[in-house]
Image (cartoon, coloured by chain):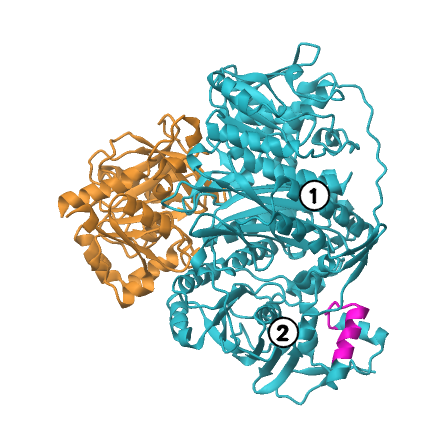
Amino acid sequence: MTFVFRCKTPFSLYKINVLAADDRQLEKISREMAIGLDAKELNAVKNYFCRKRRNPTDIELQTIGQTWSEHCFHKTFKGDITTEDGKIQSLFKTYIAKATSELNLPWCYSVFEDNAGIVEFDENYAIAAKVETHNHPSAIEPFGGAATGVGGVIRDILGVWADPIACTNVLGFGPLNYDRNKLPRGVKHPKYLFRGVVAGIGCYGNNMGIPTVNGAIYFDESYVGNVVVFCGCVGLLPKRKFAKIAKSGDIILLVGGRTGRDGIHGVTFASAELTEKSAEISRSAVQIANPIEEEKLKRAIIEVRDKELGSSITDLGGGGLSSAVGEMAHRFDCGAQIELERVPLKYDGISPWEIYISESQERMLLLVSPKNLEAVLRIFRDEDVEATPIGKFTDNRVLSIHYEGYPVADLDMDFLFAPPKTERVSKWNKVLLKEPAFPEPQNLDHYVLKLLSSAAITSREKVVRTYDHEVKGNTVLKPLHGQFGGPNDAAIIKPLEDRWKGLSISCAMNPRFGKIDPYWMAASAIDEAIRNNTAVGGRRIALLDNFVWGSPEKPDRMGSLVKACEACYKFARGFKAPFISGKDSLYNESPLGPVTPTLLMTAIGIVPDIRKAVSLDLKSPGHLVYVVGYTFAELGGSEYYRLTGMLGRSVPKVRLPQAKHIMQTVIAAIDSGCVRACHDVSEGGLVVAAAEMAITSNYGVKLQLENVPKNCNANRNDFVLFSESNSRFLIEVPESQAEKFESLADNVPHAVVGEVTNEHRLSVFGLRNGKLIDVALDKLAEAWKQGLEGKT
Amino acid sequence: MKRKEIRVCILRVGGTNCDAETKRAFQESGMKAEVVHFNQLTKTKGLLDFNILVIPGGFSHGDYVRAGAIWATQFNATLKEELSQFVEEGRPVLGICNGFQVLVEAGLLPQFEGRNPFPEAALASNNPPGYNCRWVYLRHESSSNKCVFTREIPVGSILRIPIAHAEGRFIFKKEKEEKYLKKLLDNDQLIFRYCHPNGKSAEGEYPANPNNSFYDIAGISAPSGTVFGLMPHPERAYFGWQLPDWTKSGIMPTFGDGRLIFESVAKYLTKKF
């Protein structure tokens, strides 16, 4: 029997007979309409319409499907989780938000509430930050998927009235030389995805004139089937202009691009696993990017903001109008009346439900009081941007949609925003791993060069140069430093003309650590993100967490997710670095299996005076090189092990409170002016960090491993050279300042381990056996500069 | 006239995105700069209210068709008379990056024999292809002090300024290459050439010449010296803290080389008018 009936309307509208459907039939309806609801949710829908004594229309069911999707509602993070140790009520509240609320820092302006997290910059300005994922669309259509990912996150920043000033992106691909014959049907080759994604990101940021200043690229076998694309944006917001004061009677204004059939079911698609048929079925879920439209949109929105003509704003992202209208009305405790035929369309023949859930790009929603409407419309007209009143807020907490005069939807907000609680089961399967046993290799020169040219470490210059990182003219510390293009640990932006105050942006991700222990992966990511920020002089860190995980319906994926969240709480608290915004992308599963647990940490810091910022390049021969922080024999998940095909077990840990003291010490030393260069020690370990500093400056370095502060287990040259222990820095200090530096570093592990030389060589003296490594700088540079193209 | 009386029109359309920092650079050099939307200029404000016209960087109208082509057509369709008068009166016109592309597409550069209805040169796709954001070295070639944007810069000076573009390869028609180059040199229209850090000509070598421009050309002026276009972004090299390795020296330099261009035109106008 059929459950779908055409209504007697002059346009396409259907009613779905859920009242007569049993569980199996409900699931069939959900599948066929691609609304992605589970049995429990479908029954809640059925009960609701039983109470209303009528069947839902297609647009109503679609609206519910969008609103309750994982992508829009984050039901896994908000739901109940049964673990071996008991029940967790909301991962989000128990771990992520808890760290922030317990820290209760006065400079956190708006966290987890809005499109983006907002923290204080100075008396008058705030900083908004947001990082999004766009994995699923990028897997199908890398250019469009990545470009619209950038476009979407920029609109999130506009969605809190902030002016976007910098973009970031972190990408994860399968190995670029992946064997084509091993690719399952429907999975695109990593090289194709890599090129498309990089081009898409560059296109959007460059065209909009927002500098792309920070990012990273990772490679992992599990990313072959599940490409990872994080897009971030940071914005500047005059505090007084933050208007979120919408009320009943305000006009709902749809502004920006036209609505089309692109991006239908983007969120339900994002909340499902990728399959062989994804490209075929879900191509329409990928939106089409038009950065110039968004550039104009941005100008108009900033003018509306400055003239204080809007009462609220949000972006149209996942779920399109359905989630934007609903979430806005819900937030202000209002209802909404929509006249859907007013929505400007790209072409005819789009059904009402498609209009309502389309995710066409470059659109935003403004709330404007009737008295300001004319002025707002004029601003958009002057910028050649369409603005259309499509309805208004009401005081009855009902979402009521009409199309050409016919009622097509009538839903209670209280129902729409109270989906049944999701229940997940988590089971932590401890991975049984062994620490490899092998003799110390003889030819360590060779390993240094191999590390420098490995995909994880080699220069990203060719990619980074395709992103405009200078536009707006405010990039103080650039992603590529100086003539030799060395990798600065964080970018610094000087957002205000008349202030020396800067903003530092860094990130970190350690997917390989997660294969050993997701808890220490999360802890390491937090330490490294903060470390990167610290290295340039950034402090007062705010964190953004972005999870990319497998299906939450599978207990082992949940098991590792819970572990990572536990660490997030503990270490964010310990470092006093609150989470201000975050996002989860679950269901990253493909025919090749789940994505490796991947947690991106983005850190936003403050540099009180950019003139004191520190870069990684060595400044002068004769200066001393210090190591700050303790080296342990922690090579599990290291790049050194990976080169020899091993994973290991000794994952780097983070030791609080010492780790925090180390960060504070480095900041104090930078502020005192005795630090001439600073670089964080991460992938590849101490020797790679030293090599990067040398390459960037064209000066040589001489190191004595014996002097490195280390644990007794770190008793081999290769361990000391390549361990990826957290909380470590390499710091250049002029001899004249050594005393000052040492007194500041008194309570943390530190030692002089070498000096800057004029010799254009990297020389390392080993623990016992004299000169261990001796490589000419141009050989190091040649290896490091090989770039990713060499890997294709 | 005094510096603060100099009115700078920084023009924009959809896709222009370097207007704010360009405005900042002019203001920092003491002039009065205003960002004006092209629609405004055709409706309410007059071009002739201004002393300098600047077409800043960006992707005007998405750079569809060819970089700068749509805006150039729009110029010629709606502002041709005013613009001609503006140029004939010797009021300076500056095109940076996308602005340079617009000036070439609109026939305002190189303008060998008056304004040509067809472009006499082109800013073609980079070679190596793709968008490229990097700092380059420029050698100032003009010896006659004719170019009002560079007359304060001694001939042979080396300037360091960043580029960021995908279409910046300056070319002439192959068969006219030599003839046009000779004209450029004879008229002293060749202002900036890409060079090595030591000032040696790039000779097409990447990355000193970042896009394989013909004869390492980075910026040219009209024969009058009042219309000037360049691919590099001087507004991104105005302050010392914008330099790519300002952390190298113990003390941050106050200014970058880009400032010289803004200072030159300010001095020219204060003297001339």
The image position of residue A92, as x and y in percent, is: 69, 55
Q: Can residue B65 be seen in this view?
A: no
Q: In which quarter of the image is residue A653?
A: top right
For residue A432, side relative to residue B157 (left or right): right
Q: What stretch is highlighted in magenta?
A: A33-48
Q: Residues within 10 Å of mark 2 (few under 14, many from 20)?
A: many
Q: How many marks?
A: 2
Q: Do the residues labelled 1 and 2 touch (CB within 8 Å)?
A: no
**Inter-mark Cα distance, 1 to 2:** 44 Å
Residue picked out by circle 1 = A570
Residue A758 is covered by the magenta coloring? no
The image position of residue A199, as x and y in percent, is: 56, 49
Q: Residues within 10 Å of mark 1 (few under 14, many from 20)?
A: some
Q: In this view, does A59 lie above or below A290?
A: below
**Who is closer to the viewer here, A236 or A293?**
A236
Chain A rendered in what hue?
cyan
Chain B rendered in what hue?
orange
Residue type at mark 1?
Lys
Q: Residue shown at 44%/51% (left/top)?
A: A125
Residue picked out by circle 2 = A354
**Who is closer to the viewer here, B220 or A169?**
A169
